[in-house]
Image: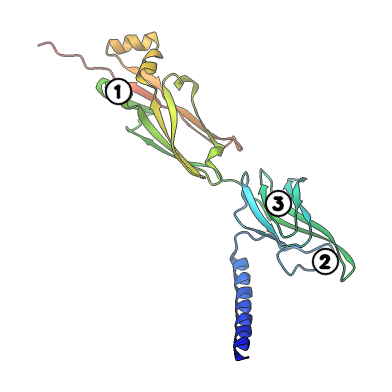
Amino acid sequence: MNKFKLIYHNFKYWKLLLSFLVIIVYTISPFKSFSQSDTTGKDIQFLPAIALNDIVQYSNAKIMSNYIHPGIVSGIMGEDTIFIKDVMPLDTSIIETKNYDRILFHWDYYEKKSQIHRSQYWYFNVSPKKEFDVTFSPIREVVDNEIVFSNKELKRIIEDGLIYEIKIDDEVNQDQILLTILEDAKPYIEIIKIDSGKTYARYHIKLKDKNEFAKNLSKDQKDKWSKGKEVKFPIGINLVDKNIPAYKREFDLVLVKEKQPKQKDN
């Protein structure tokens, strides 16, 4: 008998402790929604929905419904409310946030005990997406947008190919960042992804295969090279967020083969 009393008291203790922890977690949670009440004016005594991750534009929000009733979820964009999906009782939904300002949950149900029809709304702010970060790592110092090599060094670079590395960090998904070669650089360089995760990607920007690189040289470039003159090759790239075109970066770079010094006569 004493054993069962002990189990009972332990159960009450852990239940009380768990309730206390839930209150603390909610108090410090970064995923809280606004204080809200239902259409009857009754204060809500529990969280109708809980965000399980950060709610950021152009991402997938994971939100759990605590209601035993079905409902709907919508996106609020300015003055517009756009239906997204139906919500099942006690279900966890993956919601594409797009460029919504808020995510709105709505339940309509009849409360048998009080014989009242209730309409409950619960919503979450959607944080604006931050601009992506770029780390630029050239193999040689860049001066006035130019990377300069001697004739001998450039021959080695053509064999190896690598000119610079780009690392992209995006808070949502690195696949949303489009990296392209500037039009005038297309004959000379290529982009190779060497590593990636959910929120980052690393690329090598390399000169094209030496045979293709040589084939794409203009007649003027070939003449200058053969005469030991300075030759320039565009090697620039552009980065843009596919969802927010205002988030963009451009590296308008030029690779320079410096003029060869004239050999002195003996």
Amino acid at dot 3? Ile
**Counting other residues with Cα less than 10 Å from the Cα at mark 1, is it few (<14), some (14-19), or many (20 or more)?**
some
In this rendering, the answer to whether 236 lies above or below 91 is above
Q: Picture coordinates of residue 47 (x, y %)?
A: 70, 64
Q: Are marks 2 and 3 in contact (CB under 8 Å)?
A: no
Front in this rendered view, residue 37 or 14: 14
**Quick one: SS at disc 3?**
strand
The N terminus appears in which quarter of the rendering?
bottom right
Question: Would you say the residues marked 3 and 1 are in contact, meaning their CB atoms lie under 8 Å apart?
Answer: no
Q: Which residue is mark 3?
A: 103
Label 1 sits on residue: 154
* Pointer 2 or 3: first along the chain: 2
- In the rendered structure, which disc, 1 or 2, sits on the residue that comes first in sequence? 2
Residue pictured at 89% horizontal, 66% vertical: 116
Q: Tag on residue 51?
A: none
Of the residues shown, which amino acid type is indicated by label 1?
A: Leu
Q: CA distance from mark 2 to mark 3?
A: 22 Å
Outermost residue, right side: 115
Residue 42, given in percent of the width and then of the height, sits at: 81, 68
Q: Identify the secondary structure beneath mark 1.
A: helix
Q: Amino acid at mark 2?
A: Gly
Q: Position of residue 213 (x, y in %)?
A: 38, 18
Residue at image point 62% right, 57% down: 52
